[in-house]
Image (spheres, rainbow, N blue to C red):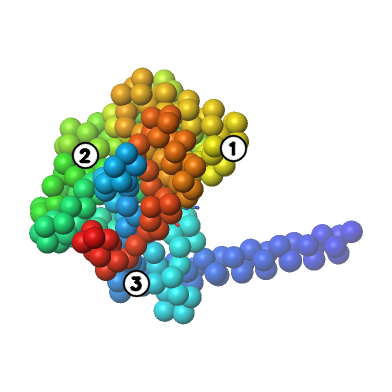
Amino acid sequence: AKEEGRNNYQFYSSKMMNIALKKATMEKELRRAIEENELLVYYQPQIDARNRSLVGVEALVRWDHPEKGLVPPDAFIPLAEETGLIKDLDHYVMCQAMSDMVEWQQMGLAPGILSLNLSISQLMKNDFFFKLQKTLLETGFKVKWLTFEITENQVMLNPKRSIKKLTMLNQMGVKISIDDFGTGYSSLAYLKRFPVDKLKIDKSFIHDLPYNAEDCAITNAVIALAESLQLEIIAEGVEQRDQVRYLLEQGCYIIQGYHYSRPLPKKEMTEYLQR
Ligand code: C2E
Ligand code: CA
Ligand code: CA
Ligand code: CA
């Protein structure tokens, strides 16, 4: 048994070594990716389903890896969070997206509102507001067009500090959207105290609409909550016409999902705006 225990230990430790090694390699690669502009910003339209007009776009990062090709964010954002690289990543996306938006505006196109995913660790950094102001100045992007999407779980890690920072953003004129709403352990009491402007219904609740009774109930409850707190409501992950119809009936008009468009690279987004 002793022998076996040792073998097990060696087995696990070599497995752990492998994971650690893989992580270290990826961290190095990700650092390079940020420095060498291997990151791409894609844009997904947010549509007012009542008249099919464009309300805004959400910026979504991709990694154009030299060997692996286009890597989705779920494969590297957690590592970026863990290693602190998320700070540079989010900053890169913010600069790129704001300058693309200004370019579209100057072309006479109307991209509307820019939604950026913001990691709470970024927001908590002392130099965050300085960097935000600097990027706004450098790109010429107006703060009234800006929304930050923050997940409720991240906010609930430190509600008091979050409220303080979000209030500062709010006073600047930036809008705050709670992303993945309904999936986390948000407390309604806190929601009332947060300077929040929008709720984004998570795509996991949208997926089986309108056929799953529980998902319908949750969606309706979130819409009712948003209405009573006078928050904007937006649905993500909408793929089917039936889902659009259901959401419209329930009073959710702003919709994001494959039904209208996949996230698009800059060039295709430009063509989309020109149509
Ligand atoms: P998220 O913020 O919840 O973004 C929505 C995700 O749903 C995106 O995945 C989008 O491509 C996908 N999606 C959109 N419409 C549909 C649909 O109709 N059906 C389905 N099944 N999916 C749809 P993506 O681009 O892979 O991003 C994954 C997550 O990575 C994002 O989730 C966000 O949390 C994070 N992320 C992406 N870009 C950034 C970034 O620049 N900074 C930070 N901090 N996080 C980011
Ligand atoms: Ca988001
Ligand atoms: Ca989401
Ligand atoms: Ca998410």
Residue assigned mark 3: 38
**Residue in the picture at 13% in, 47% down:** 142
**Residue in the picture at 32% in, 52% down:** 45
Q: Are marks 2 and 3 in contact (CB under 8 Å)?
A: no
Residue depth check, mark 2 versus mark 1: number of the one nearer the observer: 1
Residue assigned mark 2: 174
Q: Position of 10 compared to 58: left or right?
A: right
Classify 274 as above or below 243. below
Going by the numbered disc 2, the residue's amino acid type is Val
Which quadrant is home to the C terminus?
bottom left
Q: Secondary structure at mark 1?
A: loop
Q: If you read the primary sequence from the N terminus, does the residue marked by circle 2 or circle 3 appear first?
A: 3
Q: Quadrant of residue 95?
A: bottom left
Residue assigned mark 1: 211
Which quadrant is home to the N terminus?
bottom right
Q: Position of residue 14 (x, y in %)?
A: 67, 68
Going by the numbered disc 1, the residue's amino acid type is Tyr
The answer to whether residue 224 of the structure is visible from this angle is: yes
**Residue in the picture at 42% in, 31% down:** 249
Q: If you read the primary sequence from the N terminus, does the residue marked by circle 3 or circle 1 appear first?
A: 3
